[in-house]
Image: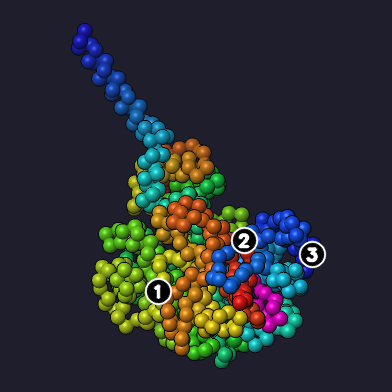
Amino acid sequence: MKRIGLIIIVLVIASAFVTQQTKPQPGGLKAAVTRGKAVYEATCLACHQPDGLGVQSMNPPLSKTKWVLGDKKALIKIVLKGLQGGEIDIDGDKFHNPMPPQESTLSDQEIADVLTYIRNSFGNKASLVAVGEVKAMRAQLK
Amino acid sequence: MKKVLILACTVVFAAAAFGSDSTRVKSSSTGTVKRDEAPITLPKGFKSVVVASGLGKARHLTVAANGDIFVKLEKLKDGKGIIKLHDANGDGKADEITGFGNYTGTGIAIKNGYLYASNDNDVFRYKIDEKTGKVDTASEQKIVTGLLAQNQHNTKSLTLDNAGNIYVNIGAPSNCCQVQDRVKGSPGQDPCPILEKAGGIWQFKADKLNQSYAEGVRYATGLRNVVGLDWNTEVNQLYCMQHGRDQLFQFFPELFNQKQGAENPAEEMFRLTKGADCGWPYCYYDNDKQQKLLCPEYGGDRQKVDRCADKTKSIVQFPGHLAPNALLFYTGNQFPAKYKNGAFIAFHGSWNRAPEPQAGFFVVFVPFKDGMPSGKWEVFADGFSQLPKDATTGRAKYRPTGLAQGPDGSLYVSDDNNGTIWKVSYSK
């Protein structure tokens, strides 16, 4: 009886672990947002600012814009490969600073986390970005 | 295209009455009076009036001998890139707002019967009758053309001397000339190829058509980005304000802590002679060490001076990232004597101090004697941001960008967040 109990516990833990591995974001949305906030503060905040509203004519806002809330693939690509500056046009306002490519500085997990964070911060509400989506885009761009 | 657009005066009156920057309030003695809701703080004896607001991205401005104000816009307003403000009744407020020029830009100046204005590649000029403020828009000529503009630092400011020359800044499309711009760990290019066509101030003839690099002179180099520059007529020399490089803390946390990254490098004022090399991208001015040092991208460690020893030294240094967007040497007689021949500087305000509190968003004054600073800089006009002191969140409401002196010695300040223009005057 004791042994059966142990087996059940082991199975439950194992299955939980397997489920975790196949989830788009470990720990779900809340954990991803928490991890993403740390990535944002270390890598993105200097230009996009604590409120995510960017800097006039220089660094674009991340709030309520199609660039962040729209096509996830395009968004992942911007983070991986960066921008020259000038490509982003929001209501006729252009943003001139370059976006540095992050492909060599951030992992797939960190990019998934930070994009999940910005898509769910600064007044935004959108689906999370899964590690697999970043991994796929990185492979596609190789 | 070049036809002057007369906007209906009613629009102006409506804007004045209902615009976000002014409201009507009851006064017991006079009935309804207009109260200015874009107040700025000034030293005792000075007062300000809002000439116009809602112009959008109002960059530099200049004032004709008759008092008409010309503002260069970075975003077209009703299809126009240059706005003319005319005060018909002498209360300081614009009564007629008209526009011309279908291009955006920053630079604008009046000299010897011509109004000069720039977009990010070219400089144009128009005949102007300064007695009436009338601009002959059909007389448009392209003076300078084909200047480098690659997004970052692409605006072209301008000033003119008394010998028939125009000076145009060409900002470097880069932070510190790294192989990969703004990528942590990417080394600085050595020599920096950007300096051939940018990162300096070029001199052209004020009256020759279609000049480009071949006809111009690289008057000063090693300047990352200049927005504020002015010809000092007292000593006949060019002065400029450099925007210092960004991201010292983000890229070199082992050398700069968060606070040091916010305070460094200095925003610098240079007195330029032909051929001056101010050091960018190899050198920066360290506000803590109070000297020009080698940039970390070029092997600097906050100690090494190296090749920076023989670069042109700045004559005034300010805290980091304040973004000096205009420089004006005051030659008027309206302000008290201490202001004569001194420098006003409009600071646009910072962004690369985050997460430390942002700073700037003010106009400062530096007293001068014989073309050199004769005292410490002081804040002249403040209150533009409308943020509490040391706030780490919130957005500045107004951002000072341009300065101009009126024929009566008044000082004009522009803001490119809302497009507000203030007239500052003094009376005993």
Element marked by disc 1: strand
Left or right of B300 in this view: B66: right
Tell me, for residue B317, which label it has, or none: 1
- Are there few (<14), some (14-19), or many (20+) residues within 10 Å of tag 1? some
Q: How is the image coloured?
A: rainbow
- N-terminal label among 1 and 3: 3
Few, some or many residues within 10 Å of mark 3 (<14, 14–19, 20+):
few
The N terminus of chain B lies in which quarter of the figure?
bottom right
The magenta stretch is B62-74
Q: Main secondary structure of the magenta part?
A: strand
Q: Whole-percent x and y of residue B391?
A: 46, 54
Which quarter of the picture shows residue B413? Answer: bottom right
Q: Amino acid at mark 2?
A: Ala
| Quarter location, residue B285 | bottom left
Q: Nearer the viewer, residue B352 or B174?
A: B352
Q: Pick the residue in front: A66 or B134.
A: B134
Residue at the outermost left position: A3
Report helix, strand or loop for mark 3: loop
Asked whether residue A11 appears in the rendered view, the answer is yes
Q: CA distance from mark 2 to mark 1?
A: 29 Å
* Residue in the picture at 43% in, 82% down: B374
For the point 71% across and 55% down, the residue is: B25
Looking at the image, is mark 2 or mark 1 earlier in the sequence? Answer: 2
Q: Are marks 1 and 3 in contact (CB under 8 Å)?
A: no
Residue marked by disc 2: B38
Q: Which residue position holds label 3?
A: B8
- The C terminus of chain B lies in which quarter of the figure? bottom right
Which residue type does callout 1 highlight? Gln
**Image coords of residue B111 (percent x, y):** 63, 85
Q: Is residue B77 above or below residue B370?
A: above
